[in-house]
Amino acid sequence: MENALVRKLEGYISLSPDDKRQLNAIIRNPRHVPAHTDLATEGDKPTSVHLVMEGFACRYKFTAEGNRQIMAYLLPGDFCDMHVVVLKQMDHSIATISPCTVVDIPRDHILALLQKPTLSLALWCAALVDAAVLREWLVNVGQRRAGQRLAHVLCELLLRLRIVGLADNSYDLPLSQKDLADTIGVSNVHLNRVLQDLRREDLITWKAEHLVIKDIDRLMEYSGFNPNYLHIGRQGANPDARTD
């Protein structure tokens, strides 16, 4: 089976055997990072790009009052901070949520990949989807009810994990209720009520860090989820579903 980075990028564009070899060549010296460890903090000027190969990480910022807002989840196959190749300074922080396997890729290796037309297009597609995810999260936090917000995030994670071969209708979800509360902008107490509502509606079960989505179509309808922003189509959510 291909590694998570190759599987993810092939979701956007067909890669040749040589493209895959070049991607595999940058995955060297993976390191294990404990949970709740910063990979980069706001203001840093990193010289390497971080690639998550296993585990969950996140982008986040703190307000002046000390409240955390999680702005994206970083899953296997995701580059955490590709923008530093151009901007060179972090404008947010990145931390592991679960124990992670991370590869640190020197900036010049990324620049070399960008000289290859197919790989440059694939990496550009990934960056554009990252921006699309951020736009959708803005709509999610700003316009949907709390229950819809959480259901929407759970649908998104399912599709993204399916692309890299880590989900069917269930997946490991190594998040705390505090993480989820900081994602959808509610208190821990409110988050607990939202989870109870989703369970009561028989939409999900979540035990021992494993989430089961009992009916993906119902959950997508409940949350108003449209997978178009992930650019993988509804087939990515449900192999039996028909695309329009």
Image: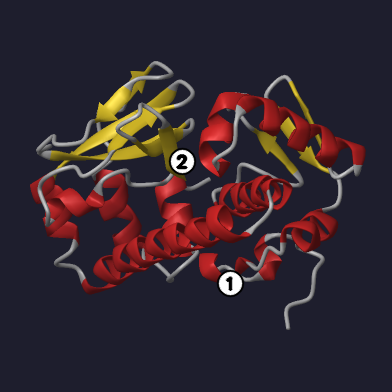
Q: Residue furthest top?
A: 34
**Residue 231 visible in the picture:** no
Say which residue appears at 65% left-offset and 57% top-offset.
144
Decide: few, some or many residues near mark 1? Use Cα within 10 Å; few <14, some 14-19, many ≥20. few
**Residue 133 visible in the picture:** yes
Secondary element under disc 2, as helix, strand or loop, is loop
Residue, disc 1: 228
Q: Residue furthest bottom?
A: 244
Residue 25 shows which numbered tag? none
Name the amino acid, label 1.
Asn
Residue 76 shows which numbered tag? 2
Name the amino acid, label 2.
Pro
Q: Nearer the viewer, residue 133 or 231?
A: 133
Q: Position of residue 167 (x, y in %)?
A: 67, 44
User: In which quadrant of the rendered view does residue 127 lie?
Assistant: bottom left
Marks 2/1: CA–CA distance: 21 Å
